[in-house]
Amino acid sequence: LGDEVLAECARWLIFIEGVGDGKGADSREVESKETNGRSEGVCELCFWGENLIGLNRTQVELSVAGRAVYSPHVYGPATDPRMYYFDSAAFPSFPANMPQVWRQHWLEPARQAGATLVVGEWGGRYTGRDRMWGNAMRQMLLDHRLSSFFWALNPNSGDTGGLLKDDWRSPEAEKRALLAPLPSTPTRPLLDGLEAFACPRAGATLQPHEHNLRFFRCGSDQPDAPPLCIHLQQACNGVHECPDMSDERRSLCRELSRSPPCVTATGSGPYRRCALPFVYRGERFNACSLDDTVGGMPWCPTALNEAGAYAAYSDWGECGPGCDVEEDRRLSTDGCVDGGATDSDGSIPWVLHCAPPPPPPP
């Protein structure tokens, strides 16, 4: 199955859940066997997909190397209290005993196999003993710098609840605080630059330049043209996605209480934050530069060197509508036309924004 997926897109990762349990021994016996180095890969009371014991002998071989990610699912006493290691009578130190359990069930097997590991699910009601468990799990992830997915966003997951309350709008503040210290990937920027699309049913009744809670309808100078929409999250994101550029209008941004960020729209690094202020050819710029432009558009670097200066042609972009621009050129010479400012020996001491590196040899 993994090879079928990779045949369609070799860049994708294949997440492989562990097994839920095994037969022939209870979980205490497995812990003893594992401790003595004689694990049979059996863990009768491992949670769903938590058992990676024996992974060094049973790894999945895919047609593309480096695409397999092993993904244990881990839950606490509020989800299933049968696990003996949740028993405070047997383990008065609970939840201090949990890291050892997790190491035996999935962390050490993955390390011994040299496998990539991402905790595919963890979560719970986050009350009582489950709160203690959740705090211990978060610390485990931080201590071992592990990535994870929290279950779930929706509140109707019966045994765990979600990050939203039952009204599907209000956040569970304590769960959000639980997750706040963990590394995360912002998803909103993934929409930057997504072209306008045919308005779906939920946006079909919108008039040009109107929006609802999900979509904004772009304007058009062609009355008979099919209506185009963008996600409302895209409005005032510092990038024009509507053909008529109405998605970054100041009136709309004021209505949404949003301030468009200064990001790049094109160039070597599109949809990235401008690195401001920056130094270029010895001059400090507090806004996008009109000097040494490529195509006449103001530009900014997206990364700087240790001196706070523009450093590489690969790290720049033309400024989007959310950026301030210098009122005029700041430099007396044009580095693109005049060859830039030169030292007494005729050399150019600056990294020129308009001078891309030479192409690699054939």
Image (spheres, grey):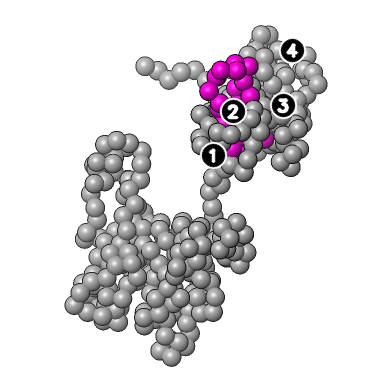
Q: Residue at x 56, y 26 (%)?
A: 227
Start-end of magenta stretch: 215-243
| Separation of residues labelled 4 and 3 (CA atoms) | 17 Å
**Amino acid type assigned to the residue bearing label 3 in the image:** Cys
Q: Is residue 144 visible?
A: no
**Amino acid type assigned to the residue bearing label 1 in the image:** Ala
Q: Which residue is mark 3?
A: 288
- In this view, the mark in front (4 or 3): 3
The residue most toward the front is 205
Q: Is residue 211 visible?
A: yes
Q: Which residue is mark 1?
A: 202
Of callouts 1 and 4, the N-terminal one: 1
Of callouts 4 and 3, the N-terminal one: 3
x, y percent for residue 280: 70, 26
Q: Which residue is mark 4?
A: 333
Provide the secondary structure element on which disc 1 rests.
Answer: helix
Q: Are marks 2 and 3 in contact (CB under 8 Å)?
A: no
Q: Are marks 4 and 3 in contact (CB under 8 Å)?
A: no
For label 2, the crowd category at 10 Å Cα-Cα, with few meaning under 14, some 14 to 19 and many 20 or more, is many
* 248 or 14: nearer the viewer: 248
Q: Are marks 2 and 1 in contact (CB under 8 Å)?
A: no
Q: Is residue 346 magenta?
A: no
**Amino acid type assigned to the residue bearing label 4 in the image:** Thr
| Separation of residues labelled 2 and 4 (CA atoms) | 35 Å
x, y percent for residue 37: 25, 74
Of callouts 3 and 1, the N-terminal one: 1
- In this view, the mark in front (3 or 1): 1
x, y percent for residue 102: 39, 70
Provide the secondary structure element on which disc 2 rests.
Answer: loop
